[in-house]
Image (tube, grey):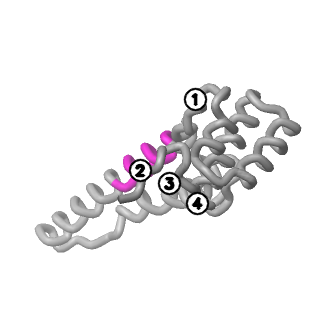
Amino acid sequence: MSEPVHPNDIRISDAERKKLEETLRRAVDAGVLDLGEFDSRVQSIWQARTRGELAKVSADLPEIKEPGPSGGRIAMTVLTIVWLSLSGLNLIVWLLLGVTLEWFYPWWVWVLVPPGAVLGTLWACGIGRKPGNSNQR
């Protein structure tokens, strides 16, 4: 029967190394590490073979939380939900009037299109996206 392996002696994967490297990037962004320290620690990450060696690289760092959604993103999401709700309500009223009064002037277009065009333009310009993330839409 083999002897149990201590948790610090378990070998690490590249995914674990990349995760810690991202933590170090956030530490640089937060001003906890300078670029020289970052470079040195990243080299140590990629030389590490076990969880114990990897833990030593970041043992002295405070917990750095993942940034939450920006105020711009929250505002754009709320505005989009309000716009969709009002547009849907106007479309339903138009359909009900059309069925009961047989009158089909598409007035709901004036409620849907102009604000929708403004919201679409703001989203396309990047308002509400995370800074430095051009792929997020």
Disc 2 or 4, which lies upstream in sequence?
2
The residue pinned by badge 2 equals 4
Q: Amino acid at mark 4?
A: Ser
Residue 132 x %, y %: 71, 51
Q: Which residues are magenta?
A: 74-84
Disc 2 crowd rating (10 Å Cα; few below 14, some 14-19, many 20+) is: few
Residue in the picture at 65% in, 54% down: 49
Quadrant holding the N terminus? bottom left
Disc 4 crowd rating (10 Å Cα; few below 14, some 14-19, many 20+) is: few
Which of labels 2 and 1 is toward the front? 2
Disc 2 or 1, which lies upstream in sequence?
2
The residue pinned by badge 1 equals 63
The residue pinned by badge 3 equals 115
Residue 122 x %, y %: 61, 53
Cα gap from disc 2 to disc 4, whole angstroms: 20 Å
| Depth order, front residue of 124/36 | 36
Q: At numbered mark 3, what does the secondary structure look like: helix, strand or loop?
A: helix
Disc 1 or 3, which lies upstream in sequence?
1
Q: Amino acid at mark 1?
A: Glu
The residue pinned by badge 4 equals 13
Which of labels 1 and 3 is toward the front? 1
Quadrant holding the C terminus? bottom right
Q: At numbered mark 1, what does the secondary structure look like: helix, strand or loop?
A: loop
Residue in the picture at 68% in, 48% down: 21
Q: Is residue 77 magenta?
A: yes
Disc 1 crowd rating (10 Å Cα; few below 14, some 14-19, many 20+) is: few
Q: Is residue 38 above or below residue 114?
A: above
Cα gap from disc 2 to disc 1, whole angstroms: 30 Å
Q: Residue furthest front?
A: 1
Q: Amino acid at mark 3?
A: Pro
Disc 3 or 4, which lies upstream in sequence?
4
